[in-house]
Structure formats: structure tokens, C-alpha cells
Image (cartoon, rainbow, N blue to C red):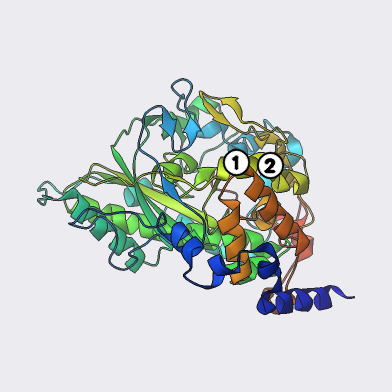
Amino acid sequence: MSDNEKKISRRAFLRAGTAAAALGVIGAAQMPGQAAAAATENMTFQASPTGQWSKLHPRHDYGSALVRFVENDDRWLGTSELLSPPQNTSEADMGFNQANRGLLGELPQKGVRNFIPKHPFGGAISFARTLIAPETVVDGEPSPEKFSIPDPEQMSQHIKDAAYFLRADEVGIGKMPPYAYYSHKVKQGADWTKPLEENIYEFTERLPYVIVVMVDQHLETMLASTGYDGISGSQSMRSYHATGNIAVILAKYIRTLGYRARAHHSANYGAPLPPLMIAAGLGELSRTGDCVIHPRLGFRHKLAAVTTDLPLAPDKPIDFGLIDFCRVCKKCADNCPNQSISFDREPVEYNGYLRWNSDFKKCTIFRTTNEEGSSCGRCMKVCPWNSKEDSWFHKAGTWIGSRGEASANLLKSIDDMFGYGTEEIPKYKWWLEWPDNYKVESAATASGGSIYNK
């Protein structure tokens, strides 16, 4: 049987409902029975009477996962336990900057300069990203006269509505963890032939709230992609650009109201985004160590943020059973082409908190020197939490997977049984490829193509 025949058979199987009936979960997925009701009871944030949530999106779209809300607590970041105060890290020590500085070897240093120009479409989108990168765009002085904000919950609802109006897919507001800021930022246009101290400066901002906006990288395109090919980079750049635009507009709007606000996006971060995403109730830290999974979108998202002192009512972090799930799944580690992801059963201590400790240096080296395509998106593609087909069967699987280790094993088995994460659906492939450009020393590099901005 051909691969296409297998895919057709699988889709016919899903439509028939046989699999879910055999698993005893058809009621939860197809009809508002007791099981489905039990799940949805916990999926809606219970806003105060004045309304903390959005009028445009009254509920977070968490898919079918069982989502619980956890209290803001200085001893935890969401469901990640803090064993000691985490230390602020320098942006110069992030993976791509280490490659740019030559700390990971000569080939990654060359490769990072071709990381974006590898695919002309992604490079074009990245160019648009740089237009909103200057400090004068992401930050600025607030208006001298403050608008009155008598109700932080009403303002929170308004900010979320504004973000959804600007085409965000998900929005959350969190208490900004002070340790989540960078200790030092890399200067725009850094020249890594010069000493480190000439390329960085101390980043001193500390504001109480963070608004996090999320954009989906596009399901059908991901289903057609290998995770290596040129479009994988373009998916990232499109979503980075989209979230960056939203963040820049929100920050300017808030400054116009008389409050401090700085946008953080992929061309100018003042903070790494994963802890901000957790604080804003949009996901949990995963086995990959550096990435946060959303209950519906998995890794298939990009983020930007706005830190601010605008009076807001923060959302609560969420728990959808991801620690239990990642403890037993290991599908991202199984499929990592460079073995960068840990197989450990339990998280370990890292910078004062518990996480699975992926090897970001190995990951960076592979991504910057991969000559088979643009970077690497295998963990994103294979993760069972990415929404796959919009089928009741997948929804039933994620509903099951959020209910403990035994259920997690079942979801992974379902995912493997139907080949989710390994398929490529040709009918969705719309882009062109230039594989000669994937070489580390390609025409784009030789002609002085733009380098990765960090």
C-alpha cells in the first residue's frame, strides 16, 4: 500500500468513528455527554463580574485538553518548581549569538549568517521584521498625562480585545517574573569581531506586567513540510513578524495612555519569551527544555510580548498535565536528528528551577549547519500536542492525554499508530525550493546576504 493510500485509509478511518468507539471515548469527542462536560467545565477562565476576558474571544482556545488554573506563586513558575532564585541571563549567551561569536566553531559561525537567507521568501519576511526592530520603535517615553484606569480587569479585557483585533490567535497577561529579563542585551548591529563588552549593555527594565501575543505558524503548511525544507524558516519569520507588529502597536498605544510599555519581539528581545508565556497562562515547559507547549498549538506558534506598568489583572498559569505527559512520551527526543533532547524521566535543576535539560549548543550547531534544509523543526512536527487534522479523533486523543501518565501513553500510542508527525501531505505544498541555497557557504552568504539579527 502506498503512503497516499495509507493516509486516505487513515482519514476514512477517522471519519468512520471506529477507533474512538473502540477506545471508549466517542462520547467525549462527539457529543456533550458527561465526559465532555467534565472537560469543558475546567477550560474557561472564570472572569470577575466586570469581565477580565475578551469580548472577541470569550474563551481561550485550548482545544480539548483538560486545563486547570494554578495560583501565581513566587515559588513556582506555572508548574515548574523554583528551587532557588533564578539568575538573569545574558542575551549574548543565547545559542545563535554563541554561534555568531564563534564559540560553537567555524562552521556554525558561517552557517548562522546564512540561517535566514537560505530561503528567499523567509529572508524577505525577515527584512520586514528588521523595520520594527529599532529601540525607537519598540520603546519610548510615555505621554506625560496618564489616562485614568479605574478598573484593571476592564483594561485587561480591552487589551486582549485590541490584540485579537490585530489578529493574534491567543493572548494572555501575566505577572512579569523579574528573573525573566535579560541581564545584558546585545546591541543592534553587533560586530562580533570586537570584544564582547563592546557589543552588549546592561538591561535594567523591571516592569510588573507582561502581555503575551501568540500566532499560529499555519497548520496546513506544517503538514506539508518535512520540518527541514525552506518553508519551515518562512513559517517562523511570518509569525515572528505578525506578533512583532501586534506588540509594537500595543506598546505604542499603552505609552499614548501615559504608561511605560516596551515591545519584545524576535528582532529585539529584552527577555526570553518562554517564561513569559508560562506566566501569561499560555503553556507549560516541555521536555525540550527551552520550549513551551500550548495545549492546542503545541510548539506550532511564535510569540511577542509587551512589558508594562499599565494597571492590569494577570491571568493564572495553566496545568494541562504536560509534566506527566512529557515524562513518558519522549517522542521529540526519539525524533531529534542530533540527539539534543534529554531522555531523562525526571526534570533536573537548571538555573534554580526544574526542567528537562536539552543541549542547546548541539541543537544550535545542527540548525546552523543543516545543509538538507532550513534549520530544523522536527520536535514541532512530531509533538502530539500540535493540532493535526481537525478531527474528533485528535481532540479525543488530547483530551485523554491531559489526564496523567497512563493516559499520556495512550495518546502517544494513538499518535504513533496513525503516523502523526511523520507525514507530508503534498496537496498543501505551495512553496518553491532552492536547495543549493541550503549549503553553509551558499550564494546568499557569498553575496553578503543579511545575517541573523542576533
In this figure, which residue is indicated by the disc labeled 1? 324
Nearer the observer, 233 or 294: 294
User: The C terminus is located in which quarter?
Assistant: top right
Percent x, y of residue 223: 67, 68
Q: Amino acid at mark 1?
A: Asp
Secondary structure of the residue carrying numbered label 2: helix
- Calculate the distance from the C-alpha at mark 1 to the C-alpha at mark 2: 7 Å
- Residue occupying the point 55% across, 37% down: 191
Q: Residue 356 vs residue 41: left or right?
A: right
Q: Are marks 1 and 2 in contact (CB under 8 Å)?
A: yes
Residue 406 in view:
yes
On residue 53, the disc is none
Q: Residue 447 vs residue 404: left or right?
A: right
In this figure, which residue is indicated by the disc labeled 2? 328
Mark 2 burial class by Cα count in 10 Å: few <14, some 14-19, many 20+: many
Nearer the observer, 230 or 331: 331
